[in-house]
Amino acid sequence: MSTKPGAGQTALITGASAGIGVDLAACFATGGYDLILAARSENALAEVAERLMKTHGVKVTPIAADLGVPDAGAKLAAEIARRGLTVDVLVNNAGFGQTGAYAETPIAPQLGMVDLNVRVLVELTHIYWKGMLQKKRGGILNVASTAAFQPGPLMSIYYASKAFVLSFTEALWEEARGTGVKVSCLCPGPTESKFHGRAGTDKTRLSKAAKPMTSMAVARKGYEGFLRNRRVVVTGVSNKALIAVTRLTPRSALLRIVRALQSEA
Ligand SMILES: NC(=O)c1ccc[n+]([C@@H]2O[C@H](COP(=O)([O-])OP(=O)(O)OC[C@H]3O[C@@H](n4cnc5c(N)ncnc54)[C@H](OP(=O)(O)O)[C@@H]3O)[C@@H](O)[C@H]2O)c1
């Protein structure tokens, strides 16, 4: 019998067509988990699925879905059930950001961030959480950001959405204490992926100042932290140091610093 941590379990990973999600999928496949991969890009998902099946010999089911629309979580779960699949581990990774002053940014992407980064994460978690607690196994890995640790002038909704994810995930970690269900919040700092192109953060002082980590290095930390039931996983020494400084900095000063970092260089 396989001694891999994921033997006999299936992980649902959202946002697994690009970036950190693809590498999280590879990490869970290495751990012997069967996978369900969800995102909008059907072809990219199919490629990832084929590669991981060949390399790791696990079962991988790609399901193309827009998760940023109402009832997206319920529809995805219904499709998963229709295919006779179950979810032991839920990785809520799909997300996007958009930079800009709140007054100058249209409402559609602002609400879009709430829908994808928060709403569907809450919905999917609610669908699978009780079953995890009943079975006393599996768990949730939510992807937040170092943005979760302070408000983000000029990227306000993105930062707030990630603060929600961090707060929610830490609360669930406590609710799961002693049950055998694992809960982790992965908080990456700047990471190489398509995120910055979509977010428009390429020109900010933050993006010029910080050296991004690779998406695989970030995914590995998240996966390993999840296996150890680490409540919060901040990636990289400099990101950890920055968060320590954040905690000691008065809020008014912090707001000015973040505003400067989110401004164009
Ligand atoms: N990159 C960074 O610097 C960084 C830092 C901190 C936190 N994060 C967080 O890490 C997570 C992954 O981001 P990433 O850097 O890997 O970005 P990415 O390369 O842009 O990947 C985002 C993933 O989310 C999926 N996605 C986007 N909109 C979707 C929708 N409406 N429905 C379903 N799937 C959708 C994308 O697939 P489709 O386009 O195919 O739908 C893609 O698979 C996000 O939650 C992000 O906030 C990133």
Image: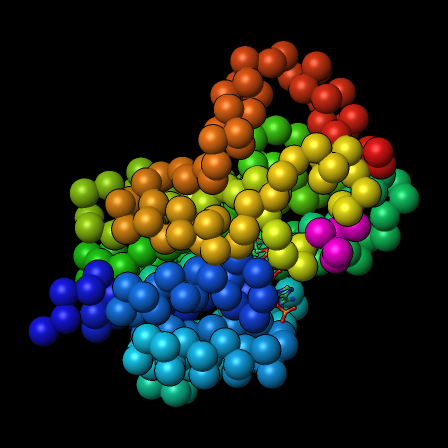
Q: Is residue 57 left or right of residue 63?
A: left
Residue located at (45% from left, 53% from top): 219
Vertical placement of 220 versus 104: above or below?
below
82 and 184: which one is in front?
184
Picture coordinates of residue 192, whole percent (x, y):
61, 52
Query: Any magenta on residue 232?
Result: no
The N terminus is located in which quarter?
Answer: bottom left
Q: Residue at the location (19% across, 48% down)?
A: 179
Q: How is the image coloured?
A: rainbow
Q: Residue at x 44, y 60 (%)?
A: 24
Can you tell which quarter of the image residue 155 is in? top right
Q: Work out whether residue 183 or residue 264 is closer to the camera in this orientation and state it.
A: 264
Q: For this view, does 96 lie left or right of residue 99?
A: left
Q: Measured from the top left, where is residue 105 in percent x and y? A: 85, 48
Q: Main secondary structure of the magenta part?
A: helix
Which span of residues is magenta-colored?
196-200
Residue 154 can be seen, yes or no:
no
